[in-house]
Amino acid sequence: MMALNSGQCAVNTATLGFQCPIEQSIDAIAAAGFGGIAPWRREVEGQDVPVIAKRIRDAGLKVTGYCRSTYLPSPTRGGLLANIESNRRALEDAAILGAQSLVMVVGGLPAGSKDIAGARSQAADGVAQLLEHGKRLGVKIALEPLHPVYTAERSCVTLLSEALDMCHHIEGSVPEPWLGVCVDVYHVWWDPNLARDIARAGREKRITGFHVCDWLVPTQDVLNDRGMMGDGVIDIPSIRAQVEKAGYKGLTEVEIFSAQNWWMKPVDEILRTCVERLASSV
């Protein structure tokens, strides 16, 4: 398998620990030779989005995904509608940025609820309402299934197969889907059906993004102790090979949450290490 160079890859700005304004992150990622960037809403909302978009274009970067959606499930119908509206605004910013997709982490159980089926129903309802808005804007929606440890709080969709089933339920079989999936190795590496479901995602043309990092042993914090590629137990090259065989030709995106390690290091060191590991461990 060919080694990856930085031009074939993108950096999710969370990898840099939000140490600097988005403008500095754009410049640093471009200077390191990366081909793309995935900004977070916390860096963009309330700012002059067209100005940020121009800076990204001028730096020669593509915008892979815009991270991430407002969680959808709510204890009330009004809350669900408010969450949908928040995501409509996110789609509008994603369109201005030129993002290929809005990354959709659907949310877990509403406060006080034990109704996981109801949460999944709300998530599907919300995504269905957002899909047409995304089409009009030219922005795909990328459902990102999360590791099952996040079911209660962050995502009631935990399997790649679940995400694909939701896509089919909402959009049906279409030759050019607007609803897809984001394959993040951190969340799916353990799944015994992963190869089967990646192949299915390829047949259905649903793979909208591919994220890499590593699972450390021991993991100190399942949210904010992700590893740099090559430092953990995920067979990233194998998953990358499956994703590419399934037809994915987009950028490989580095997304590392590392509160006690990488987020404490200088931005240039983080980016330099990413370049090295993408060439050797992905």
Image (spheres, rainbow, N blue to C red):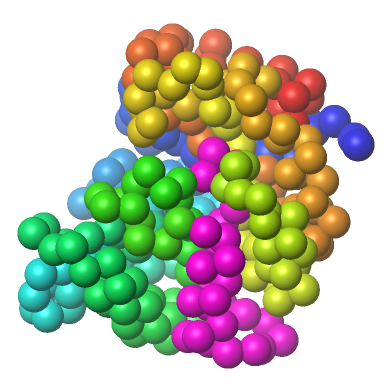
91 to the left or right of 100: left
Please state the horizontal and vertical placement of residue 11, each as a whole percent of the image.
Answer: 55, 36
Q: Residue at 73% of width from left, 44% of height from top?
A: 239
Q: Residue at 44% of width from left, 21% of height from top?
A: 219
Please state the horizontal and vertical placement of residue 195, each as a whole percent of the image.
Answer: 74, 55
Q: Quadrant of the C terminus?
A: top right
Please state the horizontal and vertical placement of residue 184, each as a whole percent of the image.
Answer: 57, 46
Q: Residue at 8% of width from left, 59% of height from top?
A: 112
- Residue 253 seen in the current view: no
Question: Magenta span has 55?
Answer: no
* Image height of 212 relative to 139, above or below: above
Observer-nearest residue: 275 or 169?
A: 169
* Residue 157 found in image quarter: bottom left
Please state the horizontal and vertical placement of residue 281, each as a whole percent of the image.
Answer: 75, 24
* Residue 25 found in image quarter: top left
* Image height of 3 relative to 56, above or below: above
- Residue 217 seen in the current view: yes
Where does the magenta region start and end? 159-187
Observer-nearest residue: 206 or 139?
A: 206
Question: Magenta span has 175?
Answer: yes
Q: Quadrant of the N terminus?
A: top right
Q: Residue furthest right?
A: 1
Q: Residue at 36% of width from left, 13% of height from top?
A: 260
23 to the left or right of 280: left
Number of numbered discs: 0
